[in-house]
Image (spheres, rainbow, N blue to C red):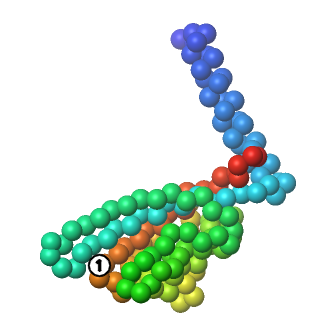
């Protein structure tokens, strides 16, 4: 079945946008242009006493290597939960706060190797409410201006 001109133009436009994104990504990797790591952090805060309310919040972060993000406040604590360490292949290495306990496994050194779109959950047990944070690495993005 023949493709109409408008459909062909739309297909070509989509292809060019995809090719441009791939080109920029290759330039980032090859020339070492500034990159940021993108993370999504989902927080669930559950009250431990009546009325047992639940608060769910989701934040997206774009951070450079060495940059901290997401904070925990309460019960005398006020510190960053995560710190982006470095990008390693298709994964991101992240350091997490000693106030948190992983729900599955424990590397012992408070660092995680996060694969793209593979969430990891951890719990904060030191406040008036229970807090669970789930971090998901979403990939890399170019810094503004590139």
Q: Residue furthest front?
A: 76
- At a point 39% along the width and 67% down the height, the residue shown is 43
**Is residue 11 visible to us here?**
yes
Q: Residue 97: horizontal and vertical position, in percent?
A: 51, 82
Name the side, left or right, on which 121 lies relative to 111: left
Q: Residue furthest bottom?
A: 108
Name the side, left or right, on which 89 lies relative to 118: right
Q: Residue 57: horizontal and vertical position, in percent?
A: 37, 61
Residue that label 1 marks? 129
Image vertical order of residue 58 relative to residue 46, above or below? above
- At a point 65% along the width and 24% down the height, the residue shown is 13
Give neighbour class at mark 1: few <14, some 14-19, many 20+ (Cα, 10 Å).
some
Q: Residue 98: horizontal and vertical position, in percent?
A: 50, 86
**Is residue 94 visible to us here?**
no
- At a point 85% along the width and 54% down the height, the residue shown is 31
- At a point 56% along the width and 69% down the height, the residue shown is 69
Image vertical order of residue 64 relative to residue 31, above or below? below
Q: Residue furthest left?
A: 50
Disc tally is 1
Who is closer to the viewer here, 92 or 131? 131
Q: Residue 60: horizontal and vertical position, in percent?
A: 51, 57
Q: Secondary structure at mark 1?
A: strand
Looking at the rendering, which quadrant does residue 9 occupy? top right
């Amino acid at each position: 079945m023949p493709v109409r001109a408008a459909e062909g133009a739309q297909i070509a436009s989509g292809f060019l946008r995809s090719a441009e994104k791939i080109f920029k990504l290759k330039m980032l990797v090859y020339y070492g242009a500034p990159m940021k790591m993108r993370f999504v952090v989902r927080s669930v805060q559950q009250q431990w006493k009546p009325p047992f309310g639940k608060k769910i919040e989701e934040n997206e972060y774009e951070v450079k290597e060495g940059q901290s993000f997401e904070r925990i406040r309460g019960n005398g604590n006020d510190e960053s939960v995560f710190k982006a360490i470095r990008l390693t292949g298709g994964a991101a290495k992240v350091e997490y706060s000693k106030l948190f306990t992983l729900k599955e496994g424990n590397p012992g050194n408070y660092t995680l190797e996060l694969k793209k779109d593979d969430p990891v959950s951890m719990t904060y047990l030191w406040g008036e409410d229970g807090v669970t944070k789930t971090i998901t690495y979403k990939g890399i993005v170019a810094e503004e201006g590139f």
